[in-house]
Image (spheres, grey):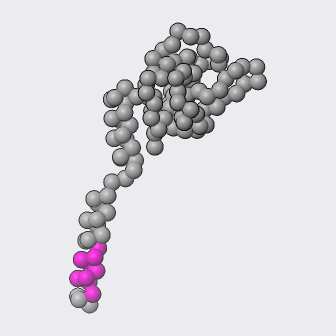
Amino acid sequence: MKKLNAPLLFVASICLIILSGCSTSSSVSKTDDAAMSAAGFVAGEIVFQKEEKEPCNFLVKLEDGTLLEPTGIDKTFMNNGLRVWIQYLPSRRMSLCPGSMTVSVTEIQKRS
């Protein structure tokens, strides 16, 4: 009986060591979030908001609910539901979409 317990204990110890060294994706994403925020990026999501009477198209919805009407955004980012990191400057142009703010995008990146 003692011979059976020794290999089992050894295998269990190796598994515990391997599993304790693994990082979870949530800890990695929190690190990425902190680094991107420190670099001046804001997290958002591309949303397609077409109103019947309003000429709204693609907007960026920030995590706090703010809607941005971006100018200068590359067409590859115009996918509904795409999560992005965005840096922007306020624009003096009047917004075409009610409840949104027109901004000039200085940089945008896909977010995981």
Residue 67 rendering spot, x and y as whole percentages: 57, 23
Segment colored magenta: 4-12
Residue 86: quarter of image: top left
Residue 46 seen in this snapshot: no
Residue 48 rendering spot, x and y as whole percentages: 64, 31
Residue 1 seen in this snapshot: yes
Indicate whether residue 55 is drawn in magenta. Answer: no
In the image shown, does 71 or 59 lie closer to the viewer?
Answer: 71
Residue beneath the point at 43% across and 27% down: 107
Residue 26 rendering spot, x and y as whole percentages: 40, 47
- Residue 7 sits above or below residue 47 on the image: below
Residue beneath the point at 53% across and 9% down: 92
Residue beneath the point at 26% across and 90% down: 1
In the image shown, does 102 or 43 lie closer to the viewer?
Answer: 102
- Residue 85 sits above or below residue 101 on the image: below
Predominant secondary structure in magenta? helix
Residue 63 rendering spot, x and y as whole percentages: 50, 30
Number of numbered tags placed on the structure image: 0
In the image shown, does 40 or 93 lie closer to the viewer?
Answer: 93
Residue 108: quarter of image: top left
In the image shown, does 111 or 63 lie closer to the viewer?
Answer: 111
Residue beneath the point at 48% across and 14% down: 90
